[in-house]
Amino acid sequence: MSHWDVIVVGSGAGGGTLVHRLAPSGKRILLLERGGWLPREKENWDVRAVQLEGRYDAAETWVDKDGREFNPGVKYAVGGNTKVWGAATLRMRPADFGEVRHAGGVSPAWPVSYEEQPERDACIRCDTCDGFPCLVKGKADAQTICVEPALAYPNVSLLTGTRVTRLETDARGRTVRAVHVERGGHSERHSADVVVLACGAINSAAVLLRSELADRSGLLGRNYMCHQNSAVFALSRRANRSVLQKTFAIFDFYHGAPDTAFPLGLIQPLNRTPALLLAQAPPIADYSPDHLASHSFEFWVTSEDLPDPANRVRLTRDGRIAVDYTPNNTEAHARLLRKTAEIFAATEGPGFDPDRHFHAERMPVRVCSHQCGTARFGDDPRTSVLDRSCRAHELDNLYVVDASFFPSASAVNPTLTIIANAMRVGDHLRKRLG
């Protein structure tokens, strides 16, 4: 068994950022990543390989609330899901950190404020960004920006192909004594003064549930949120000649609209959709895939879903991950989709028919790129799993720095908030470690 000052599990937005923050401290840090280095290869930009054949997808199945199997939209690789993110990093609005009233209920306040989070470009503006790995390291993913610079320090080590199976505590159950892993067909055991989980809100909850830890409140795995997300396809009478169109966002309805006092959410562009994908399932009939590809505008429409204890991550009897999820606050999302159609109709003018030229597809449970909330933080151990430093209330040396800690989801991509919080927790750990 090897002993370290800090073990970090997961190398994505949270874990990669934390290791980068701690690397200059001189403390001995071990970064554990379930996947390997995602290869830089031609297939990084191949639509068929990435989108249709799932070349970089996780090779496992989870189950939904009805027991149906699905392949989750997660990537096990150095850098985690940031290897294929849309590279649009939006901060939550200051108001999101307070209590927000929605048509479907109340989004709770956070125990910290917006003011407590601290604030090289190789991009060639290609058309294979959102959902694809970047062949030229221009995506600012966690591997490129955080993990590789951290590994330049002699005190930082990385083990890939390493799956954490459970955490072991001391006899009192107050301190994590060892991290049990499977690597290369063998079982290993590593220990550290501090252990940090950053496996994603679903997998971090699964590790803790498997270890039977941090659940005195009964909230571990519960209050799972993933946003209400819809991919929108709008057909224009004019050709769309843009290549990288994910360069703006519409926040006009984020806090409400003239016809409602309740928040609706965010509208942002998606990357272009190639004809090869449109040929599989055309969103609009009577047009060829080539015409649809050259005359389309794509949008990603996001509304906040609210924490609900019934929406949860749990383990099946055979130890697999199950995600029980039912959408809520749905009126806001329906209104926002109508607003999106109205904006496009006003832009297009006469001849645009929302019923024929506008298609919105709600993302199913397997699309879990915005997963959060399974180990919410707070000041009261009876109503939260983690404290305001993202340390488990019940354990002296266990922290979680992925989006598990979110008490609410807001209506923007969670990545920048994960990064900002990991920097905040990193500063806390540097003080703790001395």
Image (cartoon, rainbow, N blue to C red):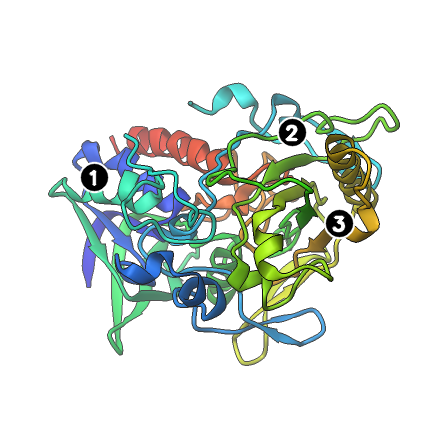
Residue farthest toward the left in the current orientation of the protein: 154
Frontmost of labels 2 and 1 is 2
Q: Secondary structure at mark 2?
A: loop
Which amino acid does the dot numbered 1 rest on? Pro
Query: Of marks 2 and 3, which one's residue comes earlier in the chain?
Result: 2
The residue tagged 2 is 250
Instruction: Tell me the amino acid under the disc marked 2.
Output: Ile
Determine the secondary structure under disc 3.
helix
Identified at 31% across, 58% down, the residue is: 33
Q: CA distance from mark 2 to mark 1?
A: 35 Å
Q: CA distance from mark 2 to mark 3?
A: 21 Å
First along the sequence among labels 1 and 3: 1
- Amino acid at the residue labelled 3: His
x%, y% of residue 45? 37, 56
CB under 8 Å between discs 2 and 1: no
Closer to the camera, 22 or 417? 417
The residue identified by callout 1 is: 149
Q: Label 1: how many residues lie within 10 Å, few (<14), some (14-19) or many (20+)?
A: few
| Residue sticking out furthest to the top | 115
Percent of width and height locating residue 326: 74, 58
Report the side of 65 relative to 175 (left or right): right
Residue at mark 1 to residue at mark 3: CA–CA distance: 47 Å
Quickly name the residue at label 3: 357
